[in-house]
Amino acid sequence: MSQYLTVLGIVIVVIAVYAASRRLGILAPIPLMIVGVILGLTPWIATPALDPDLILFGILPPLLFVAAQEFSVPAFRLHMRPILLLAVGLVIFTSLAVGFALHAVMPSIPLSAALALGAVVGPPDAVSAIAVARRLGLPRKLVTILEGESLLNDATALVLLRVAVAAAVGEAVGIGGIALTAVQSAGGGLLVGLVAAVVMTFLHRRTLYPLLDNALSLITPFVAYYAAELIHGSGVVAVVVTGLYVGHRLPTMMSAASRLQMAAFWKMVVFMLEGAVFVLVGMHVNFIVHDLTEPIEVIVGLSALVVGIVIAARFVWIIPAFYTTRLFPSRERDRDSLVQPIVLSWAGMRGAITLAAALTLPLYLSDGSTPFPHRTLLIWLAFVTIVVTLLLQGTTLPVLVRKLKIKRDDSKADALAEASVQHEATRAALVRLEQEITEHPAPTEVVQRLRQGAQIRANHAWERLGPADVETPSDAFRRLRHAMLDTERGVFVSARDEGRIPDEVLTRVQRDMDLEESLLGREHG
């Protein structure tokens, strides 16, 4: 019963904090974690155990899968160089910088253990950064790079962590072993991801029932992740590859009803999982602080050192790379501006994956009796890195973006491209219509309605190029149709209440009205 109440309480907290955050216009992860800290320090509230496997095997796969599905494969190809330099190069650079500095300042922490911490704090969690980027209208290129980095950097960090922990507990690890581990991890994950993607695509194409499509989608990330880990591959890579493959083919491999239902389902899953993770991270501060044994001045000094290196390393890596053409091709670089690399450098908040990785540090060395050196301190340093980067960078990133007055993407250019393609699509659709009615004649009024609908959609795309403060014919249509739908819905509800129609009729009609109204809302956006 207590576990049920704990889960229910976390869900209520997530909903309440998200609602308050939207009203106040702030990023939800920050207040979620603060509330979690408060709850964790409250003596009469039991803090649930945070099993690292729960996050790595239960929460990380669906979050990665959804992000990969929504990520553009063409955009990934276009920006592969900066994405890989951040997701691989920057993670390795940060891990080495943190590891060597920590070992130099506190030699009692073995270099291998210090490097393990470096791998833990190396990958940023781009959830907050992406939320800011989208809300403030940052250029699509920066958003794409942040999303791509967040998809792949966990894989790099977990491989480094595996190698560093193996060395720390006394296993023989050489250059050859490191290379073999990296190849096995990345290659195994890639292979499993491709196999899972092909199998799931095959099943989706033969599934006609939306609920079955949703069930297949739900198990896909867990199957891919666990299968990759079974062969000592990277579960992260497997899930990302599967998500990219499935997402790229999503428009053609399942029905519209399945896609609509799946989008709504995953949106709710991601909303609850992300919120719960940040609350749980905050709630565990009390456990971590309670187990620390080092002097306070040592803890504060090492905390400042690790956080400082984590923040500085991103600037040291990104800004020189930006101007030496290693990060961005010359055709994409603005040599007169530091705006984009500064924003990219400051968007380095750490998240729950950092704490989960820290909790995977073993309790003992290979002899089974010697404690892992300074394990609690290393977990604390990972936790404080999450807190400081979220509070410092997460709260100031919107201010920084506004102060730098970064140029947004040209919305007119997007609208023009959409209108051009819509015009092409309309012509192709009308040609197909003529072919169909030639082979299978249809009533004249039906054909006329279809032609008129196609022309309306084409005109609507061109209307977006006009002045924003003028009501277009499409805007007027939406406004009037919304009013009509409200009235129609009221008539059907009254008829149901009066017993003139059964609930089944209202449910069927209501669904059709909701679909039409959601389409009106989508067009409005």
Image: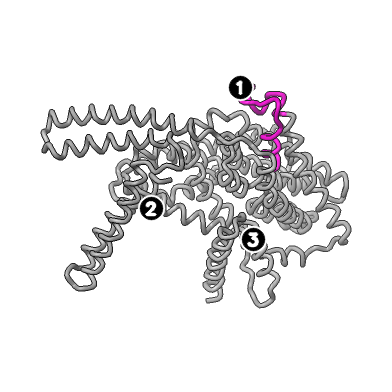
Q: Amino acid at mark 3?
A: Pro
Quarter of image, res 144: top right
Camera-nearest residue between 455 and 291: 455
Magenta residues, start to end: 321-346
Question: Which residue occupies 62% across, 62% down?
Answer: 280
The way the protein has been coloured in the rendering is one colour
Mark 3–mark 1 Cα distance, whole angstroms, equals: 40 Å
The reply to whether discs 2 and 3 touch (Cβ–Cβ < 8 Å) is no
* Residue at x 72% of width, y 66% of height: 287
Above or below: residue 278 compared with residue 194: below
Q: Earlier in the sequence, mark 3 or mark 1?
A: 3
Q: Nearer the viewer, residue 292 or 402?
A: 402
Q: CA distance from mark 2 to mark 3?
A: 33 Å
Q: CA distance from mark 1 to mark 2?
A: 44 Å
Question: Residue 289 at x, y = what percent?
Answer: 77, 64
User: Is any atom of residue 185 visible in this view?
Assistant: no
* Residue 345 located within the stretch drawn in magenta: yes
Is residue 68 shown left or right of residue 450? right
Q: Position of residue 207 (x, y in %)?
A: 30, 46
Bin the neighbour count of mark 3 within 10 Å (Cα to Cα): few under 14, some 14-19, many 20 and up. many
Residue 500 is left or right of residue 307, and the answer is left
Task: Give the secondary structure at mark 2.
Answer: helix
Q: Earlier in the sequence, mark 1 or mark 2?
A: 2
The percent position of residue 140, horizontal first and vertical second, equals 55, 36
Q: Which residue is mark 3?
A: 31
Tell me if residue 100 comes above or below residue 435 in the rendering.
below
Q: Which mark, residue 215?
A: 2
Closer to the camera in the image, 502 or 494: 494
